[in-house]
Image (cartoon, grey):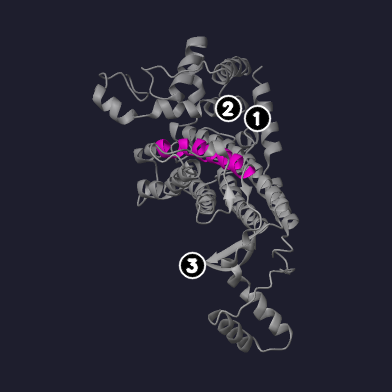
Amino acid sequence: MKPIWDKGGKEMNSLIGKYTVGRDREMDMLLARYDVLGSMAHITMLQKVGLLKEEELKTLLKGLNKILQSIDNGEFTISPNVEDVHSEVESELTQMYGEMGKKIHSGRSRNDQVLVDLKLFTRSKLREMVVAMEQLFDVLIGQSNKYKDVYLPGYTHLQIAMPSSFGLWFGAYAESLADDMIFVKAAFDMCNQNPLGSAAGYGSSFPLDRDLTTKLLGFDSMNYNVVYAQMTRGKLEKNVAFAIGTVAATLSRLAFDACLFNSQNFGFIKLPEDCTTGSSIMPHKKNPDVFELTRAKCNSLQALQQNITLITNNLPSGYFRDMQQIKELFLPAFDQILDILTMVTYMVKNISPMDNILEDSKYDPIFSVEEVNRLVLEGVPFREAYVKVGQDIANGKFKANKKISHTHQGSIGNLCNDRIKQKMDAIISSFPFEKIDSAIQSLIDSGK
């Protein structure tokens, strides 16, 4: 393999080549589409500033569009003797059009090229996350409304505490996802800034028009300072990983609840039959394997930010090859969280809550707070009411009044699901997806 920076010297040591390239070709296949889009925007700008002729631009855009179609059709590959996707795209253009194909790299470095690829890829994957999160959110809200009057015990310290409901339980995770979406939006906003034109981190003597490439790629703005643009490598992935980890934490907790509630000692829910597995020797077993795997996968994803932090910690400004290792951790994480979201959505949609759970007398003590509050409303000071009810429980005299009347915002009788949905809808509507779609489609159309 001859590296891209080869200046006519001897062939690279194959062991060194294998060690330094690593899994780059495999990871770069995920970036291929975005590398082509970045190149289309870049050469459009080069023509405007006089570094390409108009006919050259038309020809190269046509070639890039062919490569884009081959990527979308699953026909694109990175040759074994080519180092990365950037080299492959340039090589294919050179095979099509000769020396003209080599002009696409003027005014940029692989540093800003991979940065723009990563940002376009991440932006697209975050959008897929938004869609998947919204689907799960809608299922959770739907289940919350459907089962709002089905009660279950609430717990603190794993001790029965106060009355709860499936409306509250499902709704709690819906609102948690709405707050998680705030972090996804923050990660998206940081991602949606154009680094192209920062080159190796110190700009270019060419009169590049970075405003134009920002517009062509549908970015909201750019990373203005060229040194800082390069400093976002690693920082971007770390902050996106935090957003992914936040979502994963919500799903992990939901999975733990579901495993607990499904166990015979609780018996609050019945999981979908196809989401449980049996035992090799115990014929009665219906293990919640899918939720258990979900919990493990989510916990693994929460470690992603720390892994990236450890790779990038204490690096000074400028580019370092350390950052290549982030790809292998970061790029696959999106498919992992998307798979989890899809599976959890299916399971939550098909969970069957049990009725009449609180009719069991072992749950009578959870109505003690209701009795204390009733006495307070009759004029008994709270501390006296608390002591009286406590003594009645200790002496076996407590009689539970199981009529529940909670009316304040967010309580059993007033879930505020409409407001929670408004919160989620407001965040989702703030993503500039239509602007991005329009810009990218115009860029693709320019090569037809």
Q: Nearer the viewer, residue 254 or 277?
A: 277
Task: Relative to 355, say whether 222 is above or below.
Answer: above
Please name the residue that numbered disc 2 is placed on.
37
Q: Give the amino acid type for the residue marked by disc 2 in the picture.
A: Leu
Q: x and y percent of residue 48 in the render?
A: 63, 27
Q: Earlier in the sequence, mark 1 or mark 3?
A: 3
Which residue was labeled with disc 1?
Answer: 440
Disc 3 to disc 2, how far (Cα)?
A: 53 Å
SS at circle 2: helix
Residue occupied by mark 3: 157
Dot 3 falls on a residue whose secondary structure is: loop
Examine the residues drawn in magenta and state their main secondary structure. helix
Please give the name of the residue rendered at 57% of the width and 82% of the height, measured from the top-left corner.
390
**Kind of residue sitting beneath label 3:** His
Nearer to us of marks 3 and 2 is 3
Magenta extent: 327-349
In the drawing, what numbered circle is on residue 309?
none
Task: Check whether the beta carbons of the residues at disc 2 and disc 1 lie within 8 A of each other.
Answer: yes
Q: Say which quadrant the N terminus sits in.
A: top left
Q: How many marks?
A: 3
Q: Residue at x 43, y 19 (%)?
A: 78
Q: Is residue 324 left or right of residue 38?
A: left
Q: Earlier in the sequence, mark 3 or mark 2?
A: 2
Which is in the foreground here, disc 1 or disc 3? Answer: 3
Kind of residue indicated by mark 1: Ile
Bin the neighbour count of mark 1 within 10 Å (Cα to Cα): few under 14, some 14-19, many 20 and up: some
